Amino acid sequence: MRLYGSRVPAIAKDIIKELTDRELIEVSAENVEEVEEDAKSVLNEYLRAERRLTDEAKDMARQRGLDYAAHGKIKRQIADKRRFGLYEDAVGYIANQLIELLLHTPHVDEIFAEDHELRRAVAPVLRRHMAAADGIEAEVRKRVKNLNEGTREWEIRYQQELERLQQLQNLTDD
């Protein structure tokens, strides 16, 4: 499962809506946008940290003379060492970060649920959005399969196709 920056606003909105609709948290009407912004900041920070991990893993693989395929294993090792949730662990990690935010933000008036109840409400929303992103990634990989993965050309085309498909997805979501 993967998180994409283009999905961040929708995910943040859906999470806060889910928590308020289920009356797990109380947020005054004038603070809803602030809480959504807080949630977006958590999601964007996750993306930044994941990018830093990717870059660090690629650099380490390059320094060790390893091929592109090795960077995934190195990335996993670094993430495990830092207790950072990747891949299947991303949902739990992000949910925990969001719960920490809810506990500390001044924009949430009241929390009526235990951490595990909040996690149970947040995780399906994250999974739903991230699963949709997995479908996009599979389509992108299919479209760039004729290029050698890890090459500069592959990276550029992958990013171009990803952005194009995400824009199409966002148009259908709106």
Image: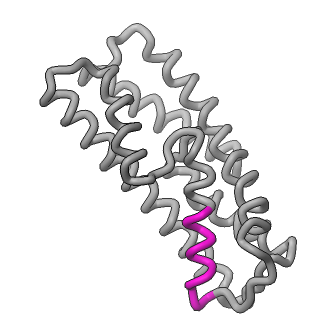
Instruction: Locate the N terminus by quadrant.
Output: top right
> Based on the displayed image, in which of its 4 quarters is residue 10 positioned?
bottom right
> Based on the displayed image, in which of its 4 quarters is residue 36 positioned?
bottom right
Residue 31 placement (x, y as % from top left): 65, 87
Residue 91 placement (x, y as % from top left): 62, 50
Q: Nearer the viewer, residue 13 or 52?
A: 52
Residue 153 placement (x, y as % from top left): 27, 21
* Magenta residues, start to end: 96-107
Residue 48 placement (x, y as % from top left): 37, 55
Q: Residue at x 52, y 50 (%)?
A: 6
Q: Residue at x 74, y 89 (%)?
A: 110
Q: Main secondary structure of the magenta part?
A: helix
Magenta span contains residue 34: no
Q: Is residue 53 left or right of residue 131?
A: left
> Based on the displayed image, in which of its 4 quarters is residue 149 positioned?
top left
Q: Nearer the viewer, residue 97 or 20?
A: 97
